[in-house]
Amino acid sequence: MNRRKALGSLLLLAGAGAAAWSGIRLRNLYSTPDLGKLQEHTELITELAETIIPATDTPGAKAAGITPFIIRMIRDCTPKKEQNRFLIGLDEVDAYTSNHYNRPFARCNIEQRTAIAAHFERRDRPYKGIAGKISHKVMGDSFFVIMKKYTVIGYCTSMEGATRGLAYDYVPGHYLGAVRLKPGQKAWATE
């Protein structure tokens, strides 16, 4: 009998600990975020966006000037839980970079930045199936998903991205539902 009571008590204690940890985590996600930290992380946001869309023969995210767009989208158009996840993610990128490379993200070379971005992309990959739907409903999008989403939207809607990064057609002619692209041809953007 004593063994059963001890095992039951241990399971009860483990369940209570897991519930408390989950409750604290959810409370942190649904609390009011400190959006002033976005201005502190402006350089990190800029460099992360440049890592996601680097400058090649077309301008990158930094040249398109999308950092104010990302900050505005986080501040004005993102739910609280995703704002909190984004701010926590920025702090985690700072901590991960300091622990692994002993320098801030902005001072890392391209290979290190790519490795850091790949680490967070793997870590923040959404679950598949019903678990992914439940996680998205309760927790919202993860940090790197939010960062990539706003980087791509900001780049494709910026003047540099739409005119030089995409094939720009100011006044489109007639409608063609299916157009074959030639090898190396850019995707289309219209205003």
Image (spheres, rainbow, N blue to C red):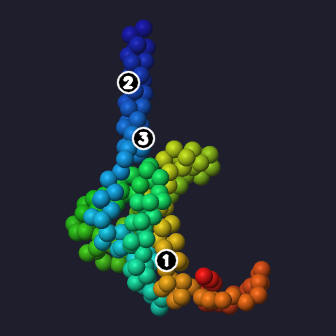
Task: Determine whether 32 is above or below 96 in the image.
Answer: above
The answer to which image quadrant residue 68 occupies is bottom left
Residue at left offset 50%, top offset 51%? 140
Residue that numbered label 2 is attached to: 13
Residue at left offset 31%, top offset 69%? 42
The image shows residue 186 at horizontal and vertical percentages of 60, 87
Q: Residues within 10 Å of mark 3 (few under 14, many from 20)?
A: some
Q: Earlier in the sequence, mark 3 or mark 1?
A: 3
Real-space Cα separation, disc 3 to disc 2, in angstroms: 20 Å
In terms of secondary structure, where does tag 2 sit? Answer: helix
Residue at left offset 22%, top offset 66%? 102
Q: Are marks 3 and 1 in contact (CB under 8 Å)?
A: no
Task: Determine whether 5 is above or below 60 in the image.
Answer: above
Q: Residue 101 versus residue 82: which sits nearer the camera? A: 82
The image shows residue 191 at horizontal and vertical percentages of 60, 82
Image depth: mark 2 or mark 1 in front: 1
Question: Tag on residue 26?
Answer: 3
The image shows residue 92 at horizontal and vertical percentages of 33, 57
- Residue type beneath disc 1: Tyr
Residue that numbered label 1 is attached to: 155
- Residue type beneath disc 2: Leu
Q: Earlier in the sequence, mark 2 or mark 1?
A: 2
Q: Residue 177 versus residue 34: which sits nearer the camera? A: 34
**Residue 123 visible, this angle:** no
The image shows residue 74 at horizontal and vertical percentages of 43, 61
In terms of secondary structure, where does tag 3 sit? Answer: helix
Q: Are marks 3 and 2 in contact (CB under 8 Å)?
A: no
- Residue type beneath disc 3: Leu
Q: Earlier in the sequence, mark 3 or mark 2?
A: 2
